[in-house]
Amino acid sequence: MILLAQFVIPLSISGTAVALPAIAGDLGASPTPLQWVVNGFNVSFAICTIVWGACSDRIGYTRSFRIGIVIAAAGGVISVLAPNILTLDIGRVIAGIGSAAVLTGAAPILSHLFKGKARAQAFALFGTINGLGLAAGPALSGLLLAAWGWQGIFAAHTIVLVIAFIGAARVPQLGRGATSLREMLDFSALKAPRFLAMTLVPVAGAIGFVTFLTYLPSALGAIHGLTAGVTGALMLVMTIPVLIAPVLVHRIMERTRITPTVIVTASFASLVIGGVGVLLLLRPDMPIALGVAPMILLGLGFGLPLGFVDAEALAAVPAERAGAASGVINLFRIGSEAIFVAAYAAILAAVITTALPGETGQLIASGGTGHPWAYYNGLIAAAVAMIGLVIVLGIAFLALSRAARRTAASPQQARTAR
């Protein structure tokens, strides 16, 4: 039930933007309040993760987890029943606040329930659930939107949270001080070059994949006029590689001498090439079929390291600190997703509304049709910024990996000399 409640968070981060055009049609098209349907959740979640961490040290993590589910579910109910865009934004902010409590409560609970190697495995599964939730978000949201409208997306989130809350009754009560936030977030692990290098991998995935995953559905509608149902199905092109790649990578690494560093390097390359390909091939004057190949590359870029990145990072720290180090990885993972999805949206809306002032620009920024080139230009600006950041992180990853190899080689050379 802990992972079930956690699963709603990445679904909310990556899947909500699919509904923006429909929400704009029902409740209004002004870009600032409309974008806060997505950004309200992401920003409140990112900020309140820190706040809830401090509060949970005092009230206990099980209580924090349960309170978070209730708050997030309340936000979902408000979102479903929202009569106007302001109420919907408030509902999404409340859902983000509750989801932050779910995250800060879930990690210490897992740390308490599992020890040693089992704890590391539990946190690896925790990270995998987040990745799968992100990948499935747009496709699931598209299907829900086609079947029950945009309210169906938030209703589904709420139902899952209610089920998780019922199951959370079986979670043992962790009182105050059972597991402190300082114990759960061991930032000293970032001093290890290998750990830091692997921590950059999910951050790059958030920037180079999750941002595209979140807003490509709107882009496909605005640029090529695709319906929500068709868009949701097409997004499977990006999400299926996320599911397949970890299995293939596991088999390849078992049977060959290909190292995790090589796989991660290929992941960075796939994110960059896929991102550039989307920019070049999703133009309004290009057939939509040409965009399939770069979308597959983006999915591979995210999926290739998904099955081993947590384990590789934790191998760089002492076993007794694995749980705390896992908390850092997941904080970077979830936090970067929330922050950079919001940044992508801000750049996109700014470029479009500058080119098309007034109500027209507001409509197009929300994913409306009629000005495909205006939306495409906004896509270029946002995507170029994200691709540039992925390149920087890729360079940093290679530099840190080289430093880690030198650090590992030094003791070996010393032993050889003796």
Image: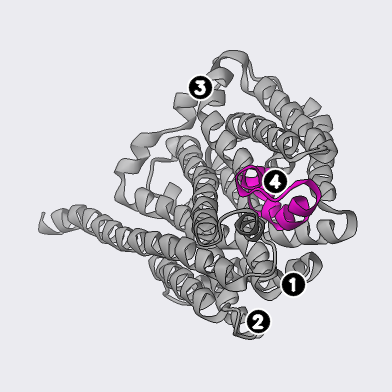
Crowding around mark 4 (Cα neighbors within 10 Å: few <14, some 14 to 19, many 20+) is many
169 left or right, relative to 413? right
The first of marks 3 and 2 along the sequence is 3
**Residue 116 part of the magenta segment:** no
Sequence-wise first label, 1 or 3: 3
Mark 3 touches mark 2? (CB < 8 Å): no
Callout in the foreground (1, 4): 1
Height in image: 360 above or below 31?
below
Secondary structure at numbered mark 2 = helix
Residue at numbered disc 3: 180
- Please give the residue where the numbered disc 1 appears in the rendered image: 226
Q: Mark 2 and 1 residues: CB-CB less than 8 Å, in contact?
A: yes
Circle 2 or circle 4, nearest the eye: 2
Q: Which residue is mark 2?
A: 288
* 25 in relation to 371, above or below: above
Q: Is residue 132 visible?
A: yes
Is disc 2 in contact with disc 4, using a CB cutoff of under 8 Å?
no
> Which mark is first along the chain, 4 or 3?
4
Question: Disc 4 residue type?
Answer: Phe
- Residue placed most toward the observer, 412 or 114: 114
- Disc 2 marks which amino acid? Ile
Q: Are marks 1 and 4 in contact (CB under 8 Å)?
A: no
User: Which region is colored magenta?
Assistant: 9-38
Secondary structure beneath disc 1? loop
Q: Is residue 20 magenta?
A: yes
Of the residues tagged 1 and 3, which is closer to the observer? 1
Q: Earlier in the sequence, mark 1 or mark 4?
A: 4
Q: Earlier in the sequence, mark 2 or mark 1?
A: 1
**Which numbered disc, 3 or 2, marks the residue closer to the eye?**
2
